[in-house]
Structure formats: structure tokens, C-alpha cells
Image (cartoon, rainbow, N blue to C red):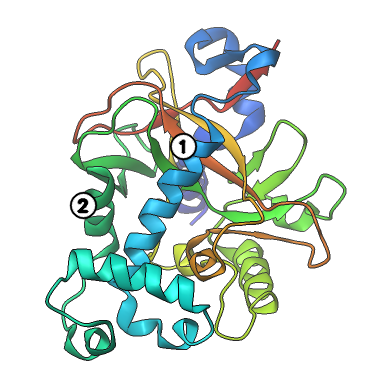
Amino acid sequence: MPGRFLRGLWQRWRRYKYRFVPWIALNLNHNPRTLRYVPEESKDKVTSDEDVLGTLLKVFQALFINDFNKQSDILTMLPETVKSKYHNLLSVQHPRVKLLEYRHQQQNTFKPEEILYKTLGFSVARATSSLISAGKGVFVTRGLVPKGAVVSMYPGTVYQKYEPIFFQSIGNPFIFRCLDGVLIDGNDKGISKVVYRSCNGRDRLGPFKMSDSTWLTSEICNPLAVGQYVNNCSNDRAANVCYQEFDVPAVFPIELKQYLPNIAYSCDKQSPLRCVILVALRDIKQGEELFSNYYTIVS
């Protein structure tokens, strides 16, 4: 019995160590390629916020159109100008189907990863990592990710540096620290999962969801929301993606917020919602696993 218990602990550690910050810190000298240096003046931006916003809107609009038969309650609340926009988008994709008939005639919708492939030319998904005993990783399953493209998002509850996260952080390898001290808890289990679901229900406005909670399940609506499972690079596996912070602008369409995989812990916070996206550092081919730099040094 003790032997089985110890073996179980060892197996968990072998998976956990790839995300355990003290272990990574102690091994930095042995893994110099796992560091990423960023000049202060670049503000850690590989691609512009405008391009990030454009990519997210493009993917989210495609997901919205694909789920059109489920959006009737939301559509009734939108201004006529916004309805006309979706009418035009629908007409381009389904020229023989009228808007009012679409939700009755649509029987087969595409899976989210298929929408991602049709929209950006690639798809990503979680699978067993190529690193020994590292657990899950993220792979490019179809197509080619071009350099500079948004390849995934880091989902989770967003905490300001003064907000309580002690209990959520215990044994949690999925907490991401932004350059300004903002934390994102991307754990899809335990108390972290409970907190996210609670905030998600709190912020709903009638038919409008302010965030996506499906990344906590096996049926993900936003196919980009897998970034928390991207493993750290090593001397043998150089990073092919990097993290980039993105604040959601106030003009972000309310009907598309249902696909944002992040939510603020505080309900009275007025500043923009912080998101973290992962950007390709080079062209990434089908079948490749994504690797990031867990340590970024700003000089």
C-alpha cells in the first residue's frame, strides 16, 4: 500500500514539475533556451492589439453564425443595424437560406475546431504531450499556423494582485502572472472551477453571457481556449509560441462575449478584462506540439 501511494505521488510530480515555478527556476541554468528576453520598449507585443482583436472577432463571428439556431434570444435584444450585419454574413455563407428560416432549416452545424480551421486555416486541440510524463499538451491538428498568428487563448479567472487567491493557488500549476501582477487562474478543476462558474453566473445579463465556461468541460465552444495546457519549452524543444497580454476593448460586441474564456473575479472592477493569447513565433506545421516560455525577462 505505501509503495502504491509513493508511486502515485511520483507520477503526479513528474507531470506537475513542468509547470511548478520553483522547479523551473532551479533548472533555468541548465535550460537557457527556456528564457525569453523582451526589451521594455516592445511592451511584449509580437503582434498588434488591432490584429489580435481582428482575429478574435473573425473567429467569434464565425462561431456565432454556426450557432445561429441557438441565438434567437440574443438576436431579439440586438439593434437592427447589428442584426443586419449578421444577416449579411449569413447570406454570404448560406445564400439560399433566409435569416428567419435559417434556425429551422439548419440541422448540421460544424464542430468548433472545424470553424477554426475554416476561419484561420488551422485547428488546435489537447492531446497527450510528446514530453515524457508531462500529461496533456496542445497540438496543431490541421493546417499551418503562420508566424504571428493567434494560436490559442489562456482561459481562467482574472485576479488583480491585491485580490485573494491563496486557496485557489494551493497545488495549482495553472496560475499565469502578467507583467503588471495580474493573475489568471486557468485550472479547470477543484475550487478554481467553482469560482469561475460562480463568476460566470454572476455576470450574466439576461440572455447575454459575459464569458464562456465550456472550457471547463470536454465540449469546448471556443476552440482557442486550450492555452493553459501548452507545456514549457526545453533545450531540446524550443518555444514556438509566446504569451501576449490583451485587454478587451469597451467596444467589444456584447453578443460575442459568450466566447471569451476569461472573467474578472471582482464584479465591481471597471478596468478592461485582461486576456492572454498565445502567438506563433514561427510557422507551425500540422502535428507539431506547442511549446512556450514560462519565464519572460523584461530588460
Q: Is 243 drawn above or below residue 89 in the view shown?
A: above
Describe the element under mark 1 as helix, strand or loop: helix
Q: Which of 56 and 223 is in front in this view?
A: 56
Q: Residue furthest right?
A: 162
Q: Which amino acid does label 2 sit on?
A: Lys
User: What x and y, as percent, mark residue 239?
Assistant: 41, 22
Q: In this view, does 246 lie above or below 243?
A: below
- In the image, taking residue 290 as reference, residue 266 lies left or right, namely right
Would you say residue 113 is visible in this rendering?
A: yes
Q: Which mark is residue 51?
A: 1
Residue 211 locus on image (x, y percent): 56, 66
Numbered disc total: 2
| Pointer 2 or 1: first along the chain | 1
The three-letter amino acid code for the residue at tag 1 is Asp
Left or right of 225? Residue 112 is left
Residue 49 image position (x, y, % from top left): 55, 36
**For numbered disc 2, what is the local secondary structure?**
helix
Query: Disc number at residue 157?
Result: none
In this view of the protein, can residue 228 be seen by the observer? no
Q: Would you name the residue on which mark 2 appears?
A: 118
Instruction: Rate crowding at label 1 as few (under 14), some (14 to 19) or many (20 or more) other CA atoms within 10 Å.
Output: few
Vertical relation: 223 (above or below) 145? below
**Splitting the image into 4 quarters, where does residue 150 fall?**
top left
Which marked residue is nearer to the observer: mark 2 or mark 1?
1
Q: Where is residue 15 in the image (x, y as percent from the top left)?
A: 46, 40
Q: In the displayed structure, does residue 85 sit left or right of residue 107?
A: right
Q: Which of 257 and 113 is in front in this view?
A: 257
The quarter of the picture where residue 297 lies is: top right
Name the residue at 67% across, 28% down.
Answer: 22
